[in-house]
Amino acid sequence: MFKLLREIVKRGEVTTKYPFAPFPVSPNFRGKPEYSGTSCIACAACTIACPANALTMTTDVRADTRTWMLNIGRCVFCARCEEVCPTGAIVLSDQFELAVRSKADLMVTGEFTLTRCRSCGTPFAPAKEVDYVMAILVRQGLPEEEAEQRRALYESCPECRRHADIMGLCKTSLVQRAKAGR
Ligand code: SF4
Ligand code: SF4
């Protein structure tokens, strides 16, 4: 008996006070993903990387919107989304108390306006993503006016860009042929 009491005194308190006091987690703990709609550019990188299909995107071409969705109920806390996000819009936090009263409370969403293609008018890319690309060009040293001149290119859908490339190639080939006298 005394031996046991001595052992208890020697070891001290081995349990934690949780849930009456916060439970400290390790610095690399992967808890609930925290999302910032302000930083997100709706690039979809995280939705492609997510192995659990917890991240999805839907496009409404009539409303010109794209909706980003996180279903925390499906998340496996792998942090792939955090790794691939170019803007730091999604990071895994230290939160682990995820119980909710309704399934709807497990959903996080963000809505983004789509840019319409300058040529055909089809909504195709989030306006924030286009602005992000423009900002990168300026950050890389391209003068702002030149970057703005390229905006038309980035505000054209892939189909119209492909069409413009083909037309450009045909034009070049015709000019070369004319010069060669063929
Ligand atoms: S942590 Fe993993 S499973 Fe959860 S949303 Fe991010 S990529 Fe998907
Ligand atoms: S990777 Fe980041 S910026 Fe891109 S859609 Fe996901 S959260 Fe938004």
Image (cartoon, grey):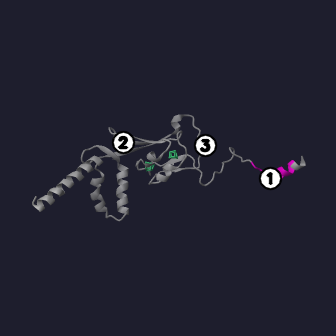
Measured from the top left, where is residue 30 in percent x and y?
57, 49
Q: Is residue 91 visible?
A: yes
Q: Nearer the viewer, residue 135 or 3?
A: 3
**Three-letter residue code for mark 2:** Thr
Measured from the top left, where is residue 29 in percent x and y?
60, 51
Q: Which residue does the image show at 38% across and 55% down from the upper left? A: 132
**The disc label shown at residue 2, or none:** none
The mark that comes first in sequence, 1 or 2, is 1
Q: Quadrant of the C terminus?
A: bottom left
Is residue 127 a member of the stretch shown in magenta? no
Residue 62 quadrant: top left
* Disc 1 CB within 8 Å of nearest ligand 1 atom: no
Q: Residue furthest right?
A: 2
CA separation in Å, label 3 and label 2: 32 Å
Q: Which residue does the image show at 61% across and 55% down from the upper left? A: 27
The residue segment tinted magenta is: 4-14
Element class at badge 3: loop
The residue wearing badge 2 is 65
The residue wearing badge 1 is 11
Q: Residue furthest left?
A: 181
* Tags 1 and 2 touching, CB below 8 Å: no
CA separation in Å, label 1 and label 2: 60 Å
**Three-letter residue code for mark 1:** Arg
Disc 2 crowd, CA 10 A, few/some/many (<14, 14-19, 20+): many
